[in-house]
Amino acid sequence: MTTYTAPVDDMMFLYEKLRNNKFYNELDKYKDVTPDLVKNILEEAAKINQNLILPLAKAGDEQPAVLENGVVRTPPGYKEAYKKYIEDGWTSLSCDPKYGGQGMPKTVSAFFDEMLSSASLSFKLYSELSIGAYNCINHHATDDVKKKFLPKMVEGKWSGTMCLTEPVCGTDLGLLKTKAVEQSDGTYKLTGQKIFITSGDHDLTENIIHLVIARSSDSPSGTRGISLFLVPKFIVNEDGSLGPRNGISTGSIESKMGIKGSATCVLNFDEAAGYMIGPKNKGLNSMFTMMNLERIVVGIQGLGISEIAYQNSLIYSKERKQGKSNKNNSSNGSADFIIEHADIRRSLLNMKSIIEGERALCFWLSQQTEVSLNHNIEEVKQEAADYVSLMTPVVKALFTDMGSEITSEAMQIFGGYGYTKDQGIEQLYRDNRITPIYEGTNSVQAIDLVFRKLINKNGDIIDRYIKMIKKDLENNNEKLSPFIKDLNIYLDKLISFTTWIKDKVENSKDDANAACNDYLKVLGLIAVGHSWIKVLEVSFNDYDNNKEFYEDKIQTARFFFQRVLPRIDTHCISAMSGSGYIMDFKFN
């Protein structure tokens, strides 16, 4: 079984030293969120994740959620843990106090998301989609609907889902067949089937609030005719009490490679009563409020699983003896701990340098997200929103792809033991493997980045982002100069790649499509490198106050700049070779 210690010290370092976004610090609503308060929250979060939730990971994998006589039952221990989880207020952490929430910023809740992902992704998914549904309802529903549904969702007594995928469509939602027929009282009756619905049914909450995209009977075909509906598992009476079961049934639970404790359901809607959320035929716009935030959270899932994989690999490397290192001159045949071998150290530093850089990037993005939602100057909000839009597919795809790489490396460090179930490492690999797939596959994220996010109605976003990095690199700290020099070299390669891909978007879409994944990784590596520069600046300036901590940061960053950042060369050369030899290939 895996062990886990929440990286509270590293999280607090980011919160105390890198919370330097001028516009974020102008947000009045977070003036009382002090480092002492955040440290207290994170320490309590560490306790519940390490002691209560971590053991659920193995339990859920060995005894998955099951469907019995039409009822979905979660794995042993889930109900008791969820009861404690909501009693302690973790579902309300980032929610509006107006509905009973604690009002913590994303800069705090993102750390909790990471811890929970490390401890048990399956358990996390039962509340994660609820927060996404809460955000969507809070942004787009009427006040009456908000008052009726949000308090119980914030409390955790009711949960939420996102129902998009159907047997006939995944990414191409314009093909959906679920129908909504308007009733005389303004409600709708929905009929159709949704598949791959995370936490679609379970026994943890009294009610489940489904957000369903469907086509009204008088709406046009394609994505222009999609609306969003709130469809509860149980009808909610006017006084807030629960009425009869709605026309929703669970057809089956998917048998999956990983996240087995999470019930991934086929849901059948048979004239189920629902309320339209947001404008008619604008359902995708409303749902993207949930999806975009969820994509960032999925990236954090990859980060969280990477962290626990790294921690267990490091522990194992200090316990397992195998072979002699180059320093071993003994004549009695004694072996060394494998951490003494250069290749094992390379693997560990690869994990560590990526994880800590990603965490710093995520913290920067959390600040931008809060500015985009809450700043009182529209121009400032818009610029932050553009940066969030640009980096959302990058964080989702890069962090989850790196999660696959890191969990695979962890299994390699454990050797044959890693391939067995006893250690829990192969489960981390399996659990993470869904993250590059759901909430839009990583190839879809790359296409979205290149064709929709580099330039939008607000102008050339990627150009502004690159200029922002360039400005941050105008630093006279002599100790930083080697790192800045390296990042500038690769930033110039990103600039050339960007010019090339903009041209291909206009003139050769196959070339652009074939290069999208490489482009996303180049931009992601630059973004992580930029985050490392911010960490290094603090590390050099504050070095004497915490030498051991900052020396660790400096050496970890050195590995990233020498061993990880140069991957950019391969991505650029590969991508800019074009697509002719790909598209002209004849498959037999």
Image: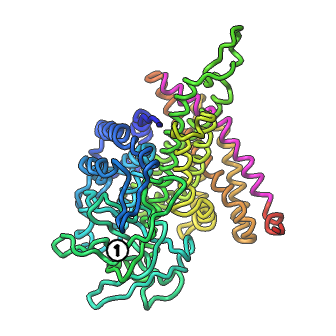
Residue drawn 44% across and 66% down?
Answer: 265
Could you say which is closer to the camera, residue 320 or residue 91? 320
Q: Is residue 127 left or right of residue 342?
A: left
Q: Is residue 64 left or right of residue 429?
A: left
Q: Residue at the left extreme? A: 239
Residue drawn 23% across and 61% down?
Answer: 99
Q: Is residue 306 magenta?
A: no
Q: Residues within 10 Å of mark 1 (few under 14, many from 20)?
A: many
SS majority, magenta? helix
Query: Which segment is the magenta one?
Result: 548-577
Whether residue 456 is visible to the viewer of this picture, yes or no, is yes
Residue 290: x percent and y percent?
42, 65
Q: Is residue 233 left or right of residue 420?
A: left
Residue drawn 23% across and 69% down?
Answer: 147
Whether residue 29 is visible to the viewer of this picture, yes or no, is no
Residue 172 picture quarter: bottom right
Residue 233 picture quarter: bottom left
Residue 278: x percent and y percent?
37, 77
Residue 518: x percent and y percent?
68, 55
279 w.r.t. 69: above or below: below
Q: The C terminus appears in which quarter of the rendering?
A: bottom right
Residue 135: x percent and y percent?
36, 63
Could you say which is closer to the camera, residue 180 or residue 517? 180
Q: Secondary structure at mark 1?
A: strand
> Tag 1: residue type?
Leu
